Amino acid sequence: MGMPVAAGGGVIGLLVLLATVLLGGGGGTTGGLSGFGEQLETDLDAPLTEDEEFVQFLTEDTQAVWADIFAEDGRQYAYAQVNTFSQQVSTGCGGATSAVGPFYCPADSQVYLDVGFFDELSSRFGAPGDFAQAYVVAHEIGHHVQNLLGTSAAVQERERSAGSQEEANQWSVRLELQADCYAGVWANSVYVRGEEDPTGDVGLEEGDIDEGLAAAQAVGDDRIQSQAGMEVSPETWTHGSSAQRQEWFNRGFESGDPDRCDTFAE
């Protein structure tokens, strides 16, 4: 299931405000899409917003798919919790603010997401639509899968032993591209269920995959550096180019097979 072969992977991060919205990290986070601070008090009895309900649905659906995949492989899947917050949050990886965007914390096996990020994804990054949002959630759950399989720990060890920051970044890119591929595996399951559902109530709508690919393109390191007025420098990338992110998401979608997501073997 996409395990590294005598190798590791990497994490997220470009220290530019525009970049950190989708590339944050720090405090040991993975797939960073958030930052640092103290958690705001929230009303636990307050009804969920439409965006929060959508995130909850995506969380349950994505993880049900992975639970089935794990079961087929003789493994037991441990569910992650996805937390929505506003502005600031405390996590097992430290404090975080909305400025960094959604992220996965392996220390507490939880995903953190300020749903206001979806507005940023649409307005700033030019990737609107429900399926673009679904891509973000599925990518973060992909990091949880990597954590369960031991891939994240292997990647962190490789990063620590890397001879240079450029080498460490290369492992980071591999980890992130695999999470993109895992997001595509989930998207494939939605497509398959739609093909098998005679009512037409389940499945992909026209343009959904285009939205997912647009989101993957929007968060490519090269595109973010270019938009920030920076020189495009592949040696600093931690997630991969727009083309790479689209390629691996599409590979997962077309195959529906996690074993096709071994970014460490290429």
Image: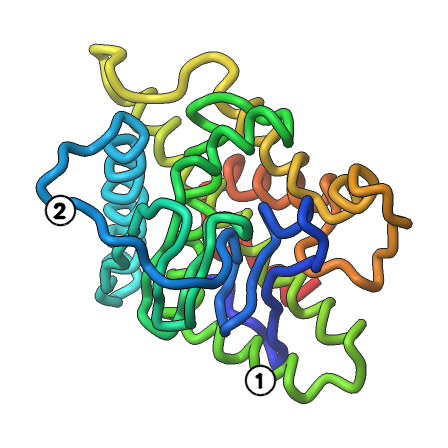
Q: Residue at x 47, y 41 (%)?
A: 136
Image x and y of residue 3, in percent? 51, 69
Q: Residue at x 9, y 41 (%)?
A: 45
Image x and y of residue 109, in percent? 32, 66
Image x and y of residue 203, in percent? 33, 22
**Which mark identifies residue 75?**
none
Instruction: Select label 1 or label 2 by which is in front.
Output: 2
Front-lying residue, 147 or 256? 147
Above or below for 57 versus 107: above
Q: Residue at x 79, y 46 (%)?
A: 225
Disc 2 packing (10 Å; few <14; some 14–19; many ≥20): few
Task: Answer with left or right where residue 37 lies relative to residue 43.
Answer: right
Label 2 SS? loop
Above or below for 200 versus 10: above
- Separation of residues labelled 1 and 2 (CA atoms): 38 Å
Front-lying residue, 58 or 186? 58
Give the quadrant of residue 15.
bottom right
Q: Visible in this render: residue 143?
A: no
Above or below for 257 versus 55: below
Residue position marked by numbered label 1 in the rendering: 157
**Which mark identifies residue 44?**
2
Q: Visible in this render: residue 122?
A: yes
Above or below for 107 versus 95: below
Q: How many marks?
A: 2
What amino acid does circle 1 point to?
Glu
